[in-house]
Image: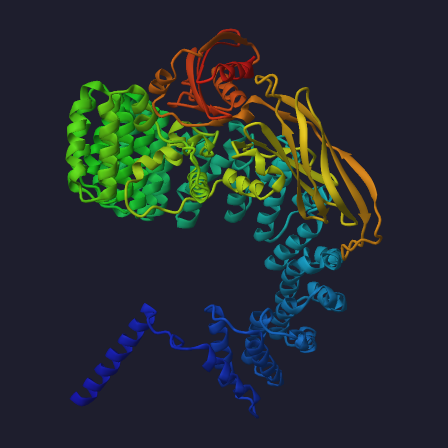
Amino acid sequence: SSNVASLFDGKMLGSRRDKKDEGDGTQNPFHRLDKTSALQEARTFNETPINARRCCQTLTKILYVINQGESITAAEATQAFFAMTKLFQSQDVTLRRMCYLTIKEMAKLADDVIIVTSSLTKDMTGKEDLYRGSAIRALCTITDSSMLQSLERYFKQAIVDKTPSVASAALTSALHLMKPGFDVVKRWVNEAQQALSSDNTMVQYHALGVLYHIKKRDRLAISKLVDKYSRSGLRSPYAYCMLIRIAAKVLEEEEQGSDSSLYDFLETCLRHKSEMVIYEAARALVNLKNISARDLAPAISVLQLFLSSPKPTLRFAAVRTLNKVAMSHPLSVTTCNLDLEGLISDVNRSIATLAITTLLKTGSEGSVDRLMKQISSFMSEISDEFKIVVVDAIKSLCLKYPRKHNVMMSYLATMLRDEGGYDYKKAIADTLITIIEEHADAKELGLSHLCEFIEDCEHTVLAKRILHLLGKEGPRTPQPSKYIRFIYNRVILEKPSVRAAAVSALARFGAASEQLTASVIVLLSRCLVDEDDEVRDRATFYKTVLEQKQKTLTSQFVLNSLNVSVVGLERALHQYVQEPSDTPFDLKTVPLATTLPSGGVGDATRGGTEAGAATGAGKAAPVAASRQDVYAEQLGLIPEFAHLGPLFKSSPKPVELTESETEYVVQCVKHTFMRHVVFQFDCTNTLNDQLLENVWVQLETADGFDVESTVQCPALKFNQAGTTYTCVKLPEDDPTQVAGTFTCTLKFKVKDCDPNTGEPEADEGYDDEYVLEDVDVVVADHVQRVVKSNFASSWEELGDEHELNDTFALPSMKTLADAVKQISQFMGMQPCERSDRVPDSKLSHTLLLAGVYRGGHDVLVRASLVADEGVKMKLAVRSSDPVVSQVIASAVG
């Protein structure tokens, strides 16, 4: 008996181990399978009689190999496919369905797959329901537009079949067949409407999808479809959800409000018996554009009820939707705050995270402290991904309630000291930096927290970025000397790349504060013996510049960065070395780095050339060529433009000269050189029965401008882009005349062609023309935006020799923010020191702009704005050239 007991225990132990291994998923029967052995086993398909079980295993192996991404040649796939077709002789149900799966997977790999069409058609119209649905899906994958017409009647019969699986298979296949044969599928509309009255939920859902895709190009037909079924109702909740989405799309396109019958339909769906339909209707309502808080109320109430649902999926869906609504309508969501607070302790951490971030967006200023305590209770239990979501919510709350930045910055500093990955720490550092840049009162506290963080920071990229921020913002604080200790510690303790960034930050303190210059020079002297050459080079360079005690030098080489394109600098230096010359290399021949118009200087600094000061030593990342660098390379290959010199600026966005629906679509990009402007016209021919040749644009120039040359586009085929250029010389007599309007006419020779082949029907064509919109050359086309991180030093550096002052009344500008935006746009210059951000309820503001005028002349603008019956502006322009000052001032006048 003891032997029997031990044997039984052994079997039980073995079965437990087997089940455990199964649960772990560690045993994969195909993990050593290779393509060759799987395809060789396909020989078993030729055996007689057919071993169904063994053939099923072989097909499974082939499908596994395909889905693992193994490369199978067309010959190998075709050989296995033809061998597999013999398996249709077997009547085994499992084997037949495996054949269908294999056909679907190999349809794009093998040749001549249409050989199984007759077998699939036979199964599709047979009496075995288990075969029919799968056969329809397999047949769909091998059917092209030429075969579809011969199979059309079979698909039509299947759509109205009484067996739900067959009807659903035919309807879903119809959706796939719309791409190769829409003209055929659209004739199945009557059958789809008949299927829509089916009692089966999935058939009704698929039928509605087919009807929508057939009619979606006809707005009136879609409106009738929605109107009909919103009144009669549908049995399938899935179909109801699709109908809600279609109704919401129509409502958006027609820009109708709550007075529309479709809005009433969506509101009626909030009382449907299916929770799925209720949620879909609520989601559709809250996502409508320009919806009022009053119209949102019913949807918010439904979502509030879902917050207390016992089903985690409903709670998650509701809180996720409310989280999104809180971004645009925070006051409407405040009614759910009590329910959201209850979800903070939800066992599902995803729900809890969304609840707390929603509360952070909707909470009042008085609830900030309480919310921060609640966050700290579960932050250790969630992943970094959800922690980042919480940090982003804290950022938005801090921007909303600036007086609470002390509480939130202290909490963020605590989070910085906790365990976490790079992305999490980067999100916190980004938030602290944003708060520092947005609120002057938070600068010292935020910099102190960041100083403590870099004392024990394991992420090199973050340390370099914070050091760069300290070098930029630290010298402007009341006590800049207190940050030098933290920066110099990095010179002693860190990696070479961080040490190099620390040296650059120290130099900024010495350049910005005369009291600290001597101390910084001493510290830089200690860096001259550093083991890394980049650190030594930076220390030597900055020490030499600071010892000169010249404001011009420190402003140009320490406080402000070199605003040149790295790719353009490399190209210019390479060309200079290839062609030796006695003339020194001129930095003005190098294209400037492009700065995006959007965002403040903080954004530009982080993404622009100035960030290079913080990158430090080490392996540099490859610099991607900017859009302007690409244009410069393209224009340099055109012989007619070889004498124009380096490209100064390309317009950031193409100018549309035609509507997008016209027969010829033309866009214009303006390229500014030292004494010329090149107009690049990108043309597209949308007529498939025409071939355009010798395409060019005739310009009627303004006074003083002369057309110097034109580069034609030899041929413009249907739907293929082509480019033609026109070079215009700028006026020489009056250098202040830089703006003008040009009338454009597209000229070409037309040849009629075959729409199918695109080949011209005759050798000779006829001349034709097409009138385009006018193109304006403005002052902004001659100015390149640059970032000046220390505007005051740059202003003093230029001096007042060529300063121009003027006063303007701007009655058309209603607010200071509008004035700041339009002035920056008219002048084509970059706002500095976040002066493009106008605080609310402020009646006066100073806008600081920086740029480089064509020819390499620096230009700065200080505009004092006052809100008084529009906006009044006192303008001061400084430049290294008096003509440039006049041109810039004329941009506003």
Whether residue 484 sits left or right of residue 759 in the image: it is left
Question: Percent position (x, y) of residue 852?
Answer: 46, 25
Task: Report how many numbered discs are placed on residues in the image.
Answer: 0
Whether residue 743 sits left or right of residue 106 in the image: it is right
Whether residue 540 sits left or right of residue 743 in the image: it is left
Which image quarter: residue 413?
top left
Residue situated in front as seen by the camera: 558 or 126: 558
Question: Percent position (x, y) of residue 762?
Answer: 85, 52
Residue situated in front as seen by the camera: 22 or 710: 710
Question: Percent position (x, y) of residue 228?
Answer: 70, 45
Residue situated in front as seen by the camera: 436 or 690: 690
Quarter in which the C terminus is drawn: top right
Report the residue at 60% width, 40% height from top. 248
Whether residue 203 is visible, yes or no, is yes
**486 versus 354 height, above or below:** above
- Give the colour scheme of this rendering: rainbow
Quarter in which the N terminus is drawn: bottom left
Whether residue 96 is visible, yes or no, is no
Residue situated in front as seen by the camera: 425 or 788: 788
**117 versus 44 height, above or below:** above
| Extreme residue in the front direction | 582
Which image quarter: residue 15?
bottom left
Question: Percent position (x, y) of residue 307?
Answer: 41, 41
